Amino acid sequence: MSSTVGSTGEASATRSETHVEVRALMQSLGRAAVAAAADLARASSAAKSRALGLAAAAIRRRSAAVLASNAEDMEQAQRRGLSAPLLDRLKLDGKRVEAMASGLDQIAALPDPIGTVAAHWERPNGLRISRVRVPLGVIGIIYESRPNVTADAGALCLKAGNASILRGGSESQRSNAVIHACLSEALLAADLPAAAIQLVPTSDRAAVGEMLGAMQEYIDVLVPRGGKSLVARVQQEARVPVIGHLEGNCHVYVDRDAELTMARSITLNSKMRRTGVCGAAETLLVDRGCAAAVLPTLIADLIAAGCEVRGDEGARAADPRVRAADEADWYAEYLDAIIALRLVDGVDGAIAHIARYGSAHTEAIVTANAATAERFLARVDSAIVLHNASTQFADGGEFGMGAEIGISTDRFHARGPVGVEQLTSYKYVVQGSGQVRP
């Protein structure tokens, strides 16, 4: 008995010591980030752009090392039994590494938002008031699987004059470390503080707890990128503001006035281009007015591409291979080769379905009727709405932002792709000539 108690006590003491070490580590990162943020707020546009260009060059130069580290991460992730969507998010190849580097180049070429005057006016008493963009400060990013977030998030924060603390998942630890090394090398070469972009060097989960609940002295905003459980935890436990979305239940609505060839290509691309991204379509809505003409073809296309279709009674009548959908399917974010299919009564039926079951992320309408499209775009209250285009365009890079730190479904501060401009705040600069308030 005494040995059991002793072992338990020793284990408890070890955990306590480890927690103290993690807290000390995170506090050190926080202090360094605050100091770096103060330097970045004064950094020139040229220095920030130079750092990003050098980081892109470093990633290209060290692409073999990036891919080798990623292969090790992939091997370990497969042994751990990670799901296919997570493995897809984790995997890097030559094309994805080049996309990462190109994203850095694009961010470098963007206009610097810091110091720009968003609005200016003069009051009757002669006061001249300007609203000027400023950095947010220190941004914490907690993410899973995607090693490209290390480059994208660090670069976007830097361009907007913010320091960043990046906490990637253990499954991508090796990949993240090599990418971060490229960023650190570039910062130093551009005479910017290396602490402007910091990668949490431990996979201990206590580090996440520290970022959520014990670092409000250092972190100004948190951004979660990952599965529903991670995002939910961040939104529930964070003691600083959070930018993010919980789910991406995205819809494609095929209207009675849709052109069939376009409807087929948009539906298939929205669902199957990459099933594990948050902009992948999860529900297909089809107007009853055209169901007989288009439904068999749309279903056949999806099944031929390897997609499981779960549908309502009308969908099952069109093709016996369609499985029965239940209520949970209309809410589902599958992130897999599965789609829910429902017939609706025109555009108003589609709008009502999205309002009830959607997650306010991304929705698309396919129609040749301009009035119907305008009704859909005006009445669907989601962060991104598209007409005659795939939901997979829900991406900051595709919006011309160079990259994104995530898609926000919030209704305050930032909504939709969160790029450089969305990572800023503003202050009011008031210039007078001796005015006093009566």
Image (cartoon, rainbow, N blue to C red):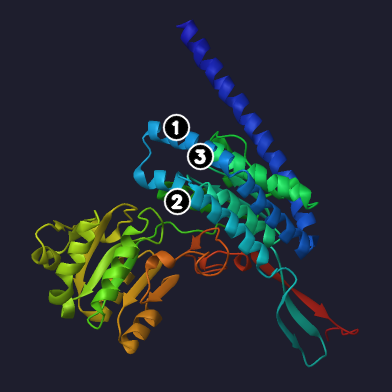
Secondary structure of the residue carrying numbered label 1: helix
Write down the residue under mark 3.
Answer: 70
Q: Is residue 304 above or below residue 266?
A: above
Which residue extends farthest bottom?
124
**Quarter-of-image position of residue 364:** bottom left
Write down the residue under mark 1.
Answer: 76
Q: Residue 232 bears which disc, if any?
A: 2
Badge 2 local density, few (<14 within 10 Å), some, or many (20+)?
some
Secondary structure of the residue carrying numbered label 2: helix
**Where is the C terminus found, in terms of image quarters?**
bottom right
Q: Is residue 161 left or right of residue 101?
A: right
Do the residues under discs 1 and 2 have CB atoms within 8 angstroms? Answer: no
Q: Is residue 295 shown to the viewer in this render?
A: yes
Q: Is residue 269 above or below residue 152?
A: below
Q: What amino acid is at disc 3?
A: Asn
Disc 1 vs disc 2: which is toward the camera? 1
Q: Residue at x 25, y 70 (%)?
A: 285
Q: Residue at x 41, y 71 (%)?
A: 382
Which of the two discs, 1 and 3, labels the residue nearer the N terminus? 3
Residues at marks 1 and 3, CA–CA distance in whole angstroms: 10 Å
Residues at marks 1 and 2, CA–CA distance in whole angstroms: 26 Å
**Where is the N terminus found, in terms of image quarters?**
top left
